[in-house]
Amino acid sequence: MMNDENKLQVQESEVLSLAAMEAVVENRMKLVDKMQEILNRHIDPAKDINMVYGNICRNINFAKKAYRIFGGRFEFVKDVQGIPVVLRKEMKDEQGSYYVYEAFGKYSPPFGAGDVIEASGMFSSRDEFFGKTNEGFKPTSEVNEQNVRQAAQSECFKKCIFTALGMSAITDEDAAKAGIDMAKVVGYKGKVKGTQGGNTLDAKEMDKLGLIESMCQELYKSGVHSPLTQKPFVSPEEVLKIATTSDKFTGWDGFKKISPKGMNITHKNVQEFVAKMETLPM
């Protein structure tokens, strides 16, 4: 049986263990708060944040920035041949067949004793960015499969980095406290300047506006040459302008000028233009 002296020693040991654990937790909380403070100071609201269904979300650009700032080691989970594991899953429902890609990765942050964060990222051929039109879903044969695969890998990377660094959703209060100029975020509060004055977008229109800008940004950064100048696009706005110019319309020269009425046709025009340009040599 345990005597009173031994019981007292056990109790004291438990108290010391709890105190040590509390100190570790407190230090980690301070570290996470400090990291978020540093990262928020480096947010470019026009490039690092997207509006998704009315919510403020850090995007892949911000994940890459965070990785460059803090370092650590990220790698995709690989098979025995050293090839990243990205699974293609065939799916089917009443609307037809489609597929989902899921990528797997792990991140060892530069702090913590051997911490390893594992996560997966998924994207579907029905994702609005790749496979959705105003009329419904595209046939899988018309979806750029490589883009879906790459998006799954990007989502995996983003989840690993944000989870390890304790990056949660951004609220209006967080943005104000960090001094982030939310007026520069596409679709924030749905306020844009239309050609006929101020317009207000609903949540779906805000998301579609974000998709339009993302597509134009990606094509601009790809280095593909403009069909008009035969030189690389000089800005995402130039992509938008050329994609939306027709015999009846001179094209939008700014994302915040797109009207709610023109959102769907603009999304379709940009989507078709980007798909066409991705097939051309740089």
Image (cartoon, rainbow, N blue to C red):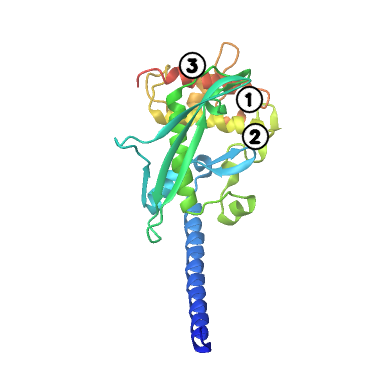
The label on residue 192 is: 2
- The numbered dot on residue 4 is none
Query: Which residue is depicted at the point 45% across and 17% down?
Result: 276
Q: Nearer the viewer, mark 3 or mark 2?
A: 3
- Name the foreground residue: 46 vs 148: 148
Q: Is residue 240 left or right of residue 81?
A: right
Q: Which amino acid is tagged 3?
A: Ser
Say which amino acid is labelled 1: Met
Q: Verify CB contact (< 8 Å) between mark 3 and mark 2.
A: no
Helix, strand or loop at mark 3: helix
Q: For the point 48% across and 38% down, which residue is it?
A: 121
Residue sitting at the far top: 247
Query: Which image quarter: residue 83?
Result: top left
Decide: is 105 above or below 245: below
* Neighbourhood count class around disc 3 (C-alpha, 10 Å): few under 14, some 14–19, many 20 upward: few
Residue at 31%, 37% (x, y): give it: 80
Give the distance between the C-alpha atoms of the residues marked 3 and 1, in whole angstroms: 25 Å
Is there any visible trace of residue 62 in the rendered image? Answer: no
Task: Report if residue 76 is visible in the image.
Answer: yes
Residue closest to the eye, 173 or 16: 16
* Mark 3 / mark 2, whichever is N-terminal: 3
Residue 226: x, y in percent? 42, 20
Disc with the residue nearer the chain's start (3 vs 1): 3
Q: Quadrant of the C terminus?
A: top left
Question: Helix or strand or loop: what does disc 2 sit on?
Answer: strand
* Dot 2 amino acid type: Val
How many residues crowd around disc 2 within 10 Å: few (fewer than 14), some, or many (20 or more)?
many
Q: Give the residue pinned by disc 1.
A: 263
Could you tell me how many numbered marks the image carries?
3
Relative height, residue 202 to residue 130 (above, below): below
